[in-house]
Image: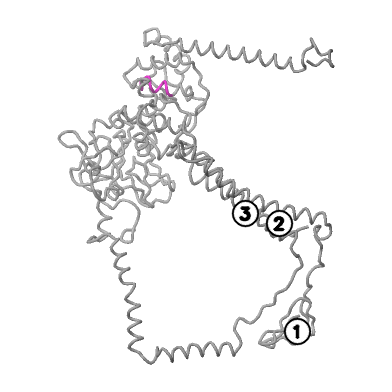
Amino acid sequence: MAQDEKSGTDIAAAGSSHAEHELVNAGTAVIDPDPFENPGFPPHRHRVTDENPKREKRAQRTVYTLFYLSIVGSIWAVAAYMLFPIESGDPTDIRLNNMFFGIGCALALLAIGFGAVHWAKSLMSDVEQVDERHEIGGSPETQAAAAKVFADADEESGFSRRSVIRNSLIGALLAFPLPAVVAFRGLAPQDQIPVPLLYHTMWRKGTRLALDPSGAPIKASDVTMGSAFHVIPEGLAELEHGKLEEKAKAAVLLMRLDPNDLHPSPGREDWAYDGIVAYSKICTHVGCPVALYEQHTHHLLCPCHQSQFDITHEAAVIFGPAKRPLPQLPITVDDEGYLVARSDFTEPVGPSFWERH
Amino acid sequence: MNRSKPRRTGRRHPLATVALIALGLVFTGGGYAAFSSSTAQAETVANSQQTIDEGEKLFQANCATCHGTGAVGTDAGPSLVGVGAAAVDFQVGTGRMPMQMSGPQAQVKPVQFTDEQTKQLAYYVASLGPGPDIPSDHLSNGGGDAANGAELFRINCAMCHNVAGAGGALTEGKYAPPLTETSGVHIYEAMVTGPQNMPVFNDLNISPEDKRDIITYLKYVQDSTPVGGFELGSLGPVAEGLFIWIFGLGAIVAITVWITAKSN
C-alpha cells in the first residue's frame, strides 16, 4: 500500500485490504461493499541462474561472448569493405561487397541486441517491483513560482505594456513564411489552369501515328492482322520540353482486328480504319498503362488492378475496378497511306478528377 | 609402404567395386552424349523436296487430327496455311505442339520430335503458303545492342513478360511465359508469329535488327548474375512483400515472444 502525502489520497496497491478501501476518495463512484480481492503477485520462482552458480557462469559467458562477437562483426564489416571492393565494374562485386559487409553489420547489431536481452533475462534482478504513479502536476509552490517567472518576464520586457513592439513582432513572424509560399507556388504550372490540360492531349486532326520510341510514322499497310503497335503522336519524340507529360496523356495502343469483329456504336463507325483501332493506353481507373493485349480474345488487361477491356466492343469494361471504357482515338489514313488522327480524343483520357467523375 | 598389414596387398579396396561401376557409367554416358551430339551436328536439313515429303508424312501422322489433312484446319485446330516455318519451329520446338490437352493455352512440355523432324514439319508447312521463315543465326545469336533492346523490351514486351522476363499472368488462366530459358531462335519466332494470345510484332513494327537487340537484352538478363541476392522469381512487389510479411514479421514476432517470455 502506498500513500501520496501531497494529495492525501490513498491508492489501492498490491496487498491492500478491505478496510483500507474506506480511505480512498471515492468521488461519485459506487463502491461495491464486497469488491474482488487483489490476489497480488504469484509466489516468486527462482531462475536456474539464481540457484545454480554453474548456470550463472554459463549465462555470463554467453553474454560476453555475444558482445565480443559483435566486435568481431564490426571489424569484419570494415575488413569486408576493403577485401571485396567495388572496383572492377563487374556487378558480382556489388553482390559480394553488400553481402559480406551486411553480414558483418548484422552480426554486430544483432549480437549486441541478443546479448543485452539475454543479460537482462538471465542475470539481472528478476524481482517484480511496483512503481507507484504520482500526481502529474507540481506542488502549488512550484506552480506559483513558475507563474511568477512568466509575470516577471512580462513585466521586465514590457511585452504587454509596449504593444507597438509586440504587434510589430507578431506581424514580422506572420510575414516570414510568405516567401516560402510564393516559392512553392512557383513549382506548379505557370499561366495554366490544370483542368483544361486534362481535357486535351497532343493529338490533333491530321497528326500522324508514330512508333514508340523511334517516332517513325506508321502506314496502315504495316499493321498486319493480330499486331499491336505502341504509338505516340508524330513530333513527340522530338519535343524539347514536357515530353514525358505529353506522352503520359497521348500514349496509344494500335491493334488490327478482323473488321467483322468490331461493334462500333452509331457515329463511331469511321473511327477505325479497315479493322485498325487506336485506344488510349492510360487506364481509366488510376492511370496505369493498359497494354496487355490478347490477340485472340481481343481483351486488354491492366496489370495494376486487373481491369479488362473488350476491344471488340469499344473497350467496354468487362472486369475490374475501371469505371469507363478506354477513350478511342478516331483514325484514318492520309494521301500517302500513313495513319493519322481524325481529331484529339473526344473525352479526357485517364482516371477521374474533380471535374470529371 | 605399410608392411604391418601384408594381407591387404593384392586385394581390392572395399570401394573399388563402386569406383569401377561409377567409372563405367561415366564412360558409357559420356560416350553416348558425344555420339548423339555429333550426330545432331551432322544433320543439316535442307529445304528440299525430300524434306517436305518427310514433313508431310509426319504431319499426317501427328498433326492432321486437329489441323486437318493439308493443314487447312478443322473445328479443333486452326489452318496452318501461311503461318510459315517459324511458327512450326516455335510451337513444335518448344514442345507446345502436339498439344497435350485443351486448356487456356498450350503448355510447354518435353519436345516430342527431334530437331530434324521439327525442321521437316516446318518446311512442309512453309511449302503450303508463304510465311515467316526460321531466323538466321545472325539475328538470333544475341550479338546486338542490349541497351536499345532493353528500351524496346520495356515498351513492347515488359507489360506481359515482366521487365526481367520472368513472365506474368493474363486473363482467365492464360499467362505470358517466362523468357529466362528461351533460346534466341524461339524468342525471334514468337515475335514474328505471335503464338497463342501474343500479338504479332512484324518487321515494320520492330525491325529484324531491333528484334536482335531485344534477344541480346534477354540473353544479357539470362546470363548476368543477380546482384540483389535472392531474386524471389524476379516477380517484384508481390513475391517480395509476401516474403517480408511472412519471414520478416515472423522473425519480429518470434523475437518479441522470446524477449517477453520469463526466463526459466
Vertical placement of A312 versus B105: above or below? below
Percent x, y for residue A175? 32, 76
Q: CA distance from mark 1 to mark 3?
A: 43 Å
Residue located beneath label 2 in the image = A118
**Residue shown at 75% from the left, 55% from the top:** A60
**2 vs 1, front mark:** 2
Chain containing the residue with disc 3:
B
Residue B175 visible, this orientation: no
**1 vs 3, front mark:** 3
On residue B31, the disc is: none
Tell which circle, 2 or 1, labels the residue nearer the N-terminal end.
Answer: 1
Percent x, y for residue B93? 46, 21
Instruction: Write the start and end of the magenta stretch as one range.
Output: B83-90
The residue tagged with tag 1: helix, strand or loop?
A: helix
Residue located beneath label 1 in the image = A21
Colour basis: one colour
Side of A151 relative to A142 (left or right): left
Asked whether the beta carbons under mark 3 and mark 2 sit within 8 Å of each other, the answer is no
Side of B27 relative to A44 (left or right): left
The quarter of the picture where the C terminus of chain A appears is bottom left
The residue tagged with tag 2: helix, strand or loop?
A: helix
**3 vs 2, front mark:** 2
Give the overall secondary structure of the magenta segment: helix
Near mark 1 (Cα within 10 A), the count class, few <14, some 14-19 or many ≥20, is: some
Percent x, y for residue B87? 39, 23
Q: CA distance from mark 2 to mark 1?
A: 41 Å
Q: Nearer the viewer, residue A184 or B87?
A: A184
Residue B99 visible, this orientation: yes
On residue B252, the disc is: 3
**Residue type highlighted by circle 2:** His
